Image (cartoon, rainbow, N blue to C red):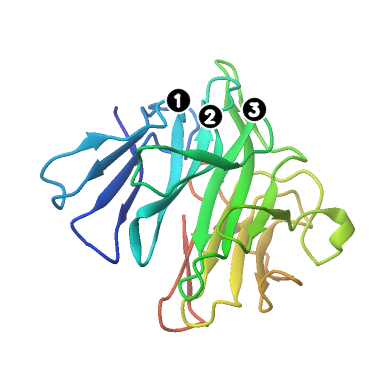
Amino acid sequence: TGSIGAVAVAESDPNVVYAGTGSACPRGNVSPGVGIYKSTDAGKTWTHVGLRGAGQIARVRIHPKNADHVYVAALGNIFGRNEERGVFRTTDGGKTWEKVLYVHDGAGAADLVMDAVNPRVLYASIWRAERKPWTMISGSDESGIWRSTDGGDSWTELTDAALDNGLPTGVMGKIGLAISSANPDRVWALIEATDPDGGVYRTDDSGRSWERINTERDLRQRAWYYTHVIAHPQDANTLYALN
C-alpha cells in the first residue's frame, strides 16, 4: 500500500501498534489501503489482521487498559460503494472484527474519538465521499456525528434534526472531532458545510447541546485533505486545527 491513514500505540503496552492503511483524506491523488496491520514488538515486525476491503482508514483507537480492544474508523472504498465501511471493533486483537456503526454503502467513518476517562464513550463522524474520474463527491444528508455510551454496542445520531441541539442537520461533508482529556464533557467538531452552518462547534455537556464558536474560513479550506482538530491533553481551552 502507498499510504497509511492511522497509527495507534497501545497505552497499556507500547509494544503493541496498529496501523490502518489508506489515507482517508482523498481528492485527486488516492492510494487505497489493504486493511489493518499489527505489531507486538514495537514495529519490528508486522502482521495483517483484517479489514482488507475497508479502503481508506481514518482512525484507530485502542482501549487504554486493553491492547486487544480496538476500534477502527473506515471510510471504505473511495472509488465505489461497499459495505466494509463505518466503525469496526475487535476485542481479540484483530482476530475477528465486528461492524458496530454503519449508515450505508456510500458513507464511511471519517473520524473517531474516545473518552480517555470513560472509554465506553465514543464519538464518530460519518462522511459521504466517493472519487470519480471526473469529480469528487463530498457531502450529503447522511453525513453527521454519532455517539455511543456503551462501547459501540449502540449509537445515537447527534445531527438528527429531532434533537434540536445546535448542530447543523442538512448537507454536511467531512467532520473532524476532538475530545478533551482534561474535561471529557467537552467535545469539538470541525464541520464542513455551506454557510451559515460550517465551522467549529463545541459541546460542554457530552453532546447534549452544541454551540458554533468559530466560523473562520482558514480552518475549512480544502476540507477533503484536512478537517482535523486536536485537543491539548492537559488544557481544556487549547485546540489545534490542521490545515
Label 1: element kind: loop
Q: Alpha carbon of mark 1 to alpha carbon of mark 3: how far?
A: 12 Å
**Along the line of sight, which residue is nearer the eye, 23 or 11?**
11
Taking the spot 81% from the left edge, 47% from the top edge, the residue there is 170
Q: Which residue is mark 3?
A: 105
Residue 197 pos. (x, y %): 77, 57
Query: Which residue is tagged 2?
Result: 84
**Circle 2: element type:** loop
Question: Which amino acid type is shown beneath numbered disc 2?
Answer: Glu
* Whole-percent x, y for residue 48 in the image: 27, 32
In the image, residue 90 lies at what x, y percent?
43, 46
The crowd level at tag 3 (other Cα within 10 Å; few <14, some 14-19, many 20+) is some
Asked if one can make out residue 17 in the rendered structure from this viewpoint, the answer is yes
Above or below — where is 157 with respect to 20? below
Measure how far apart labels 2 and 1 are at the Cα level.
6 Å
Tell me residue 123's x, y (percent): 59, 59
Q: Residue at x 29, y 27 (%)?
A: 1
**Label number found at residue 53:** 1
Give me the C-alpha separation between circle 2 and circle 3: 8 Å
Residue 23 image-quadrant placement: top left
Residue 225 bears which disc, if any? none
Of residues 224 and 160, which is closer to you in this image?
Answer: 160
Badges 2 and 1: C-beta atoms under 8 Å apart?
yes
Q: Residues within 10 Å of mark 1 (few under 14, many from 20)?
A: some
Identify which residue, 232 or 160, lies in the foreground: 160
Corner quadrant of residue 146: bottom right
Residue appearing at x 47%, y 82% in the figure = 182
Q: Earlier in the sequence, mark 2 or mark 1?
A: 1
Say which amino acid is labelled 3. Answer: Asp
Q: Is residue 134 above or below residue 146?
A: above
